[in-house]
Structures are given as C-alpha cells and as structure tokens.
Image (cartoon, rainbow, N blue to C red):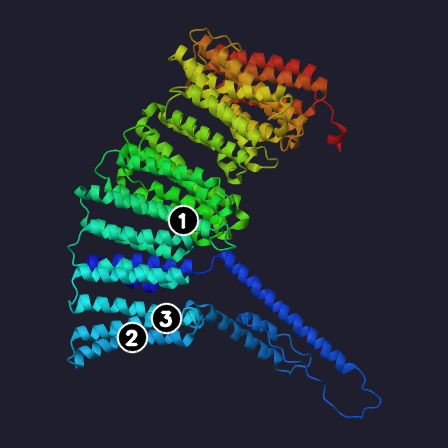
Amino acid sequence: MWMPGALIGGLLAYQIYSEAWALGAAVGALAGLLIGRALAKPPGERRLGELESRFTELTARLDWIDRRLATLERADQPAPATATPTVSARPEPAPFEPPIAPAETIASAETVAPAAEPAGAPAAEAARSQEAVFTKALRDSPLWRWLTGGNTVVRVGIVILFFGVAFLLKYAHERFDLPIELRLTAVAAGALVLLVLGWRLREQRAGYALTLQGGGIGILYLVIFTAFRLYNLLPPAQAFALLVAVAGLSAVIAVVQDALALAVLGSSGGFLAPILASTGGGSHVMLFSYYAVLNAGILAIAWFKAWRVLNLVGFAFTFAIGTIWGVKFYRPEHFASTEPFLALFFAFYLAIPILFARRRAPGLERYVDTTLVFGVPLVAFGLQVALVREIEYAAAWSALTLSAVYLALTKAVFGRRGEGLRLLAEAFLALGVVFGSLAIPLALDGRWTSAAWALEGAAIVWVGIRQQRLPARIFGLALQFLAGAAFLADPSHLTGSRLIANSAYLGCVFLALGGLFCAWYLDRHRAAVTEPERTIARVLFAWGIAWWVGGALAEIDRHVPRPYRVQVALVVLTASCAAFSWLHTRIDWRLARYPAQAVTPLMVVALGASVMQERHPLAHLGYVGWPLAFAAHVFLLRRHEAPGSHYQYWAHAVGVWLLAALGSWEIGWGIDQFAAGHAVWPIIAWALAPGALLTVLALSGTRIAWPVASHRDAYFTAGAAPLAVYLVLWGLLVNFVSSGDPAPLPYVPILSPLDLAELGALLAVALWFVESRRLALHPIATVPPAQAYGVLAALVFVWVNAVLLRTLHHWGGVPFSLEAMLRSDVVQTAFSILWTLVALASMGLATRRRLRAAWIAGAVLMAVVVVKLFMIDLSNVGTIQRIVSFVGVGVLMLVLGYFSPVPPRSPREAR
C-alpha cells in the first residue's frame, strides 16, 4: 500500500505546489503504510483464524484415521468358509478429501500416510514442505488474496478493461476525427452501463457486482479528469460538481452493499476532486467547507460501520491537504476563516474513534484505533500552534482547552460498558494530562516544544502494551529519542529567564518523565514485551535520569548564585534519590532502586566540588545540605538493605570516610576562626574526627545494632582501617611540620594540645586494633600480636622523641629545623640519655616479664646509643654536653646490667 500512497501523494502535492511533490510522496507513503497495516487483520482476529484452521485440520485428520482403522479391521477379518478362495488385494481406504485449508494445513495432512511408504518418501516430504512454505507465503500476500478472494477472472478483466479504455481514448484521439465530446460521452455511457449492471447483480453475484461497480466508478473519474484537464471541455465548477457527485454515489452504494472498497474509492475520489479540478485561484473557505461535508459523511458511515481504513483515508487526506495549503497560502488574516474548520475537523476525528470503539468487530473488544486517538491531537495541535503563533498565550489556552475536552470525554466514556471503551477512556485521560502539562511551558514562552512528543510517545507505548501492538510501541519509543534530539537542536530551549517556570527546565522534565514512564511500563510488563524492548527499557531509564539530573543542574547553574550551587544541587538530587526510593517500594519498580542508593556517590562528588570552591562544608546552606544527605544516606541504606551486596558494603564504608573528612574539615575551619595565624590548632583538628570515630567504634560499635553491628566488616575493616592508617601517617607527618606551638597557651610537654592529640590518635588506633582482634575480623585477626605491639611501641618511641624535640625548642631555644637540631649539642645529649632510659625501661620490663624479644630490642637501642656516643658525641669531648652524655649513659648501663640481665630462652626459642 505504500507505493500507491506515494504515487497519489506525489501527484496531489504536484497539483498544489510543484516543488512539494517529494513531501507529498513521503506523506502519501506513510498514509499508505498505515492503511496497509489497517487492512491487515488485527492480532486477535489473526489468532482466531489460526485456531479455527488448526481445529479444522485436526478434525479432518481424526476422520481420516477413523476411516483408515475401519478399513484395516475389515481387511484383517478371515474370509467365510463357503467362499471360493481367491487372491484379492487389501482393500484401499475410501479417498480422503479434507476441507479447504491453508497451505501448511494441507502439507501437514499429507504427512499422515500409510505405513508402507516408498524409500524416497522423506525426500519427497521435504520437497512438499518447502513447496508448502512457498505456497503459504504466496497465498498470504495481499495481491494473491485480491486475485483469489472472489471471481478472479472478473477482477483481472476489469483491470484490463480499465487500461483498454485509456488506450481507446488515446487511440481515438490520434486516429479518428470523431468529436472528443462524443468519444468521452461513449466512454461515460459504458461506465454507467457497468454501474447499472453491477447494481442489478448485487444480490445474485455480489463479488462480481462490486467489481463491475468499482470499474465503472474508476472510469467515470477518468472521463471527468480527461475532459477537464486534457481537453478543457468542462469548467472548474462543473468538473468539481461531477466529481462530488461520483464520490457521493460511490459512498452511498458502498454503505448499502457493505462494501468497504467502494467507500474508500469514493472518498478518495471526493478528496482528490477539488485538487484535480483546481486552477490555483479558489477559495480556501469553499475547499474546507467541501471537506467538512465529506468528513461529515465519513462520520455518518462510522455510526453504522467500523471501517477503520475509511477513517484513516479521511484523516490522511484532510490534514495532509490542509497542511500543504497552510504551508503555501496561510496568512495571519486567514485565522478567522481557518480556525473554525480546524476545530470542526478535530471534532470529527475525535468522535470517530469513539464510534469505532463501539462498532468494532467481535473478538476485538480490547482494540482501540491508536492512530486516530493519538495522531489526531498531535497533528491538530501542531497546526493550531502554527495558526496562533502571533497571539500571546493562545497556545497555552489551546492546550488547556484540549486538556479539558479530553478529561470531559474521559468522564463520559469511562462509565460505559466494554473493555474497549474503558481502554479508550484511559487513553483520553492520558491525553488530558499531557495537554494540561503542556499548558505550563506554552504559557511561559508560547512555543510548541518537542517535549510534547515525549509525552505523546509515552502514551502510545502505554496503549501499545495494553493492546499488544509492537509497531505502536516501537513508534512511541522512537518518539522519545526524536524528542530529545529535537529539543537539543533548538538553541532557544537552552535559556530560561524564570526559575523553574521556563521551557528549558520544564522541557527537560517532560523528556525525563516520558522516558521514565516508558522504562517503568516496559519493566512492569516485561513478560509481554520482547527482549530488545527490555534492553531499551534500561536505556530509557538512564535516558530519563540523564534528562532529570541534567535539567536540574542546568537550572541551578542559571539561577542560583555560585557559592550556593553545590549545596542546592546536593539537596535537589538527594530529594530525587528519596523520590526514586519511594517509587521503588510504592510501584515495585526494580530499576528505581539504583538511583535510590546513589546518595553516597553523590556526597563524594559534592565534597570534591566543595574542595574546588575552597569553602568549608557548612558554608552557604551546607548546614542544610550535608545533614540532609547523611540522613538520606542512612535511611536509604536501611530501606534497601540487601545482604551480600558489595555496593552497600562499600557505601557503609564510604559513609564513615565522608563523616571523618567533613568533620575534620569543619572542625579545623572552626578552630582556625578562633586561633587565626597559629597553625597547630587547625592541624590538631584533622585528627579529632577520625580519632573520635575510631574510639566510638572500638568502645560502642557492637552495641549499635544497625548499621555497625549488622555490618561489622564494612565499618571495622573497610571503614575504620583507612582511618587508622591515616592517623598513623598524620602523627608521623605532624612531627616534621609543626613545632606544636599552642599559643596563646604556654607549651607544657605531654600536656600540650599537639602531644595529647598524637597520644590520643595512637590510643584510638590501639583500641580499634584490640576490638577488631576480639571480633576476629579478617585480616586484622591474622596479624601476630608481637608484631602489632612492636609497631605500636615504635610509634610511641617516635612520639616520645618528638615531645623531646618540641620541649627543647620551646624551653631550650633550639630552632625547630632539621639542620639546627642535628648540630645542637643539647639535642644530641638529650637523645643519648632519652634512648638509654627507654632501653633501660624496655630491658627491665623484659626481665620481669621474661620477654626476650623486648630485652633484645632494648639492647639494640642501647648499642645504637653507644655507637652514637663514639661516632657523634666524641667529636667534641670538651663540651659539658658531651661529658654529661658519656657519664650519664655509662652509669645507666651499669644499672641496666645489674637489674636487667638477659632473660633465658623460652622452650619454643630453644627448639
């Protein structure tokens, strides 16, 4: 059907505007394709036909088997004793003549054969199967159905006759001098004879009669067109009247005889009549008035007949020709004489789907004419926006009016009985919501935005799933992506002067809602759709999320001051995550659980953006955004609890890291405001939050049933272990970069803020390690205790040396730099005495506890002191500091040797 449609559309457009022939051909091809699909049987009717054919086939097979068994039983019975012995062949079964069935039925029946088949039967059967497939494809084609659906000879003959008449007119024009009026009158008389003869035979030979009538009508159209266009024998008004008369005649006899083909032929001729008879100077009021009469006739037919093809033909001709006229001839001064016709045509094709839903064939109770239900408002509203382009707020009022009309129709149709009317009411409700939503952006900028395509596409997908129509679903899904491309292609959509109430943001919202609705509905009915559609549902879900997030961020960037953007974005997107969580639980939307749990990565991104802006976390509404985000983080993790989920495992851990980072940053900023210029106080703040978190986890973590106790690995291992490593590195680094000046407070060794902070950090790490070992958490439980305590002792030793250096700096006046410390005799002497005391304490403790390893460690430290004395301190033996070093170390070593002899080997070490 698309090829005739393209031909007719191209010729029609050429008659109106020669340069628009390509557009007309494209529109005609689309209309032909839609009509072809409409001519095809709906899914329910096809399925019913298949079941009937299968039932007939099975019945025929059972009859044949019964006959065969009866024949075999008679053949096996012994002959009577009195009978003369004769040699007779086995009786053959009665010939089986199954009823007429499709090709595949015949091929299947042929496979039931007697047991004794020739050796070549399989090959012959395969050949018959291949032939059956070809035969089925041929017989299912529209051309074959037309040729064989009635009297084939008559149908082929009428086609040949039509061509013969055309050739006769041409031949007579070239060879004879008969007046052209006489020749055309003779042909017209022949056409009338065909019509009269077909009418008289309508009861005896219905198929034959309809063929004759169709041929007669076609010849009359040909004669009128030839007389007007080729020979100028008829004035435009008279030619127009004749074409209208032929169209009306064909419509009347079509309805009387229940002949859809005649109705389509008559209406097509009627719509083409003014175009074929036009000279280019006619009135559009007359044209649209004539089309109003034709459409009224189609509406009247729809009251009695559910002829979908006729409805589509009228819709295609009316709006295609109207659109072409508007592109070429419409001016703003034509509004008053054009708007009523557009409203009238819209009303016609708004009522026809309702009549179709009431008059549909049996077995199609759930069938709704999707093309008209959604195509009419899409095309009509597009034309309406073009008409009212120069009138302020007219497009918005038009959308609001359409919304009210569809909502009123929803109320009127919803209470009617029948599944089809209920489905039609739901479609009207969707359209009412769509146009009500579009009224907002149209009121703001007056543009017919591409967001309407997304909403229309979502409605089409909804109906396509309800009716199990794959083409409708494909078209609706394609509209989603086309709408997005059209939106981005128009730069005017990318700006908006009002916050939220602008086409840029609302367009993104509508595109997001359209994509998300399609994704949800496909996912909800995933058992009723194909596998590619399930994949497209996931793509559309990501598509909708991208438009939602992108539109929100763009709107924030346009209208929110720069310092507040991060926090406003954090609040908006966190609320979006909570909304998706609600959708996940409220409508059982599986895909919605993914954005519902996106708060954690969202907070990581927000923290990075805050760092780039160099503003502390609670600044510029951060005191709103961050508490809200952490509350949503905990709430959504609890709501979407999934045991064994790797994502949630790391989400819990990252939450600990974020809390430590934000707490350290904010505490550091707050302390710096009260002690500006003194670097030690902000540095201390960077250990307070991680140390406090480690301490709370170690002392009270297991008493917090959720989330800590139920996710111990996530909090004690993935969450706390990085904090412990951070505290150790922080303590080592701060010893080199800070002198620990606590101004305005005086420096007191061990009691100074920095010393206490380092000691507290080490204590927090030790508590966490002990608790992790008690809970037997991997990999902490696998670390040998001796190694762990050795590392802790080494860290304490470093801390003691750092306290000594800071004391010498503040009390001894030694500059706090590496070079000055190494050259200072006071520092070297203090190191020697301190290290000796540490060695003495270690070895003494080891002797009492019989810890040989600890005693050896102290001895090694003591050896280091001795080497230091002779390599460094001996270089300047005349100073009092060197003397103190040697005397002090010597005395302490004597004491050490007396009180701390080397412990004996343990049985394990002896072995």
Q: Which mark is residue 353?
A: 1
Q: Earlier in the sequence, mark 1 or mark 2?
A: 2
Taking 811 as reference, is 194 above or below it? below
User: How many tags in the picture?
Assistant: 3
Residue bearing the label numbered 3: 198
Residue 574, x across and y down, in percent: 45, 29
Secondary structure found at label 1? helix
Q: Residues within 10 Å of mark 3 (few under 14, many from 20)?
A: many
Nearer to the camera, 198 or 351: 198
Taking the image as shown, residue 898 lies to the left or right of residue 464, namely right
| Foreground residue among 835 and 90 | 90
Q: Which mark is residue 163?
A: 2
What element does badge 2 sit on? helix
Specify few, some or many for label 1: CA neighbours under 10 Å numbering under 14, 14-19, or 20 or more: many
Query: In this rendering, would 780 be left or right of 373?
Result: right
Counting residues from the start of the chain, the first of labels 3 and 2 encountered is 2
Amino acid at dot 1:
Pro
Residue at x-position 69% and y-position 14%: 899
Give whichever of 149, 848 is nearer the camera.
149
Q: Is residue 1 above or below residue 660?
A: below
Residue at the spot 54% in from the left edge and 59% down from the top edge: 48
> Residue 906's spot in the image, x, y percent?
75, 27
Say what amino acid the circle numbered 3 marks: Gly
The quarter of the image holding the C terminus is top right
Q: CA distance from mark 3 to mark 2?
A: 19 Å
Q: Are marks 1 and 2 in contact (CB under 8 Å)?
A: no
